[in-house]
Image: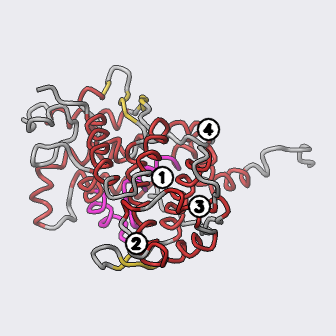
Amino acid sequence: MNTLPYHEQKDRDNIIKLRKLTKDLPPFCTDFFRGIEPRTSSRTRIAYAYDLSVFFDFLKKENPMFGKMDNRDFLLNQLDQLTVSDLEEYMEYLKYRFNERNQEVVNKERGIMRKISSLKSFYNYFYRNEKLKNNPAALVRMPKLHEKEIIRLDVDEVAMLLDEVEQGEQLTEKQKAFHNKTRVRDLAILTLLLGTGIRVSECVGLDIEDVDFRNGGIHIHRKGGKEVTVYFGVEVENALQDYLDERFGMNALPGHEHALFLSLQRKRITTRSIENLVKKYAKIVTPSKKITPHKLRSTYGTSLYRETGDIYLVADVLGHSDVNTTKKHYAALEDERRRSARNAVRLREDMD
């Protein structure tokens, strides 16, 4: 039986999952998901489904008009009865609530912003298609976001991290037992993330055939399904070559034969596994910094910008659809470059 490529299989799984989620939402939500399908990824639509389930749960718990209703009983025109005040109350509700398992859920600024953004998209769709007369979501102000400190590895920390992955000297005895089996793979993964800035999901999705040593690049699928080639240097090439020498001797389980990076169970490595191995090594090298695969991506972006000074190149290589996203992350570096330019232009020669 032919197996689908990883990204197609993930998309298929997400679509099946979305269908299950929409069965617990009001019937008109199906129209929304069908309408946004051409311009959103399946992963984004799943996030919308979760966010909308929280919204309708809020209406049943906090609004007497909907108290005894089941999700499937909601009618679209009932949303016309909601006001800006209702949605601001929802924003307040999101800060602190209990889920269906009676577990406490605390949303911070970005979590609240995402859920309100999902609701705005939901209302906009039906308002634009003239199925709703009112659009109170358009009048709701998004919560103010406080800028988070950008955490990256310094140059010496990058070298120390790769040394630790290669040698494993400070690992526990239990960790060393696994390290002997995964050292070459772990070094290839960390070198690839630090040397190309790809996302962890893009790393997980790599197949053996995606590595092109002739042109020095890897073929990846970006968010939204865009296919691109990301190029790597000699250090990444050497690490991948060493790993592939091992990889070709492994018998992957059925369905995982093409996966580049395998777990000890001979299956395609998962995002969680990569997150855990990054955390394991980084905790030894820089315990004061909470390093994740995304922080390795930021580290690469920082290094590339310092070397080239080209923010548009950094945005392109990292796969940012909007250069303003890149500028926001590297604003401090831009200011640093501007300061360094203050003496670059000489107006008059020094007088003896």
- Residue type of the residue flagged with mark 1: Ser
Kindly report which numbered mark, 1 or 2, lies closer to the viewer in this rendering. Answer: 1
Give whichever of discs 2 and 3 has the lower sequence position: 3
Labels 3 & 1 near each other (Cβ < 8 A)? no
Specify start and end residues of the magenta stretch as a single range.
278-302
Q: Name the residue under label 4.
A: 312
Image quarter in which the N terminus is found? top left
- The residues tagged by marks 3 and 1 sit, at their Cα atoms, a distance apart of 43 Å
Labels 4 & 2 near each other (Cβ < 8 A)? no
Asked which quadrant contains residue 149, the reply is bottom right
Give whichever of discs 4 and 2 has the lower sequence position: 2
Q: Against 13, is 147 above or below?
A: below
- Residue type of the residue flagged with mark 2: Ser
- The residues tagged by marks 1 and 4 sit, at their Cα atoms, a distance apart of 15 Å
Secondary structure of the residue carrying numbered label 1 = helix
Give the overall secondary structure of the magenta segment. helix
- The residues tagged by marks 2 and 3 sit, at their Cα atoms, a distance apart of 50 Å
Secondary structure of the residue carrying numbered label 4 = helix
Q: Mark 1 points at which residue?
A: 298
Give whichever of discs 3 and 1 has the lower sequence position: 3
Q: Mark 3 points at which residue?
A: 80
Kindly report which numbered mark, 4 or 2, lies closer to the viewer in this rendering. Answer: 4
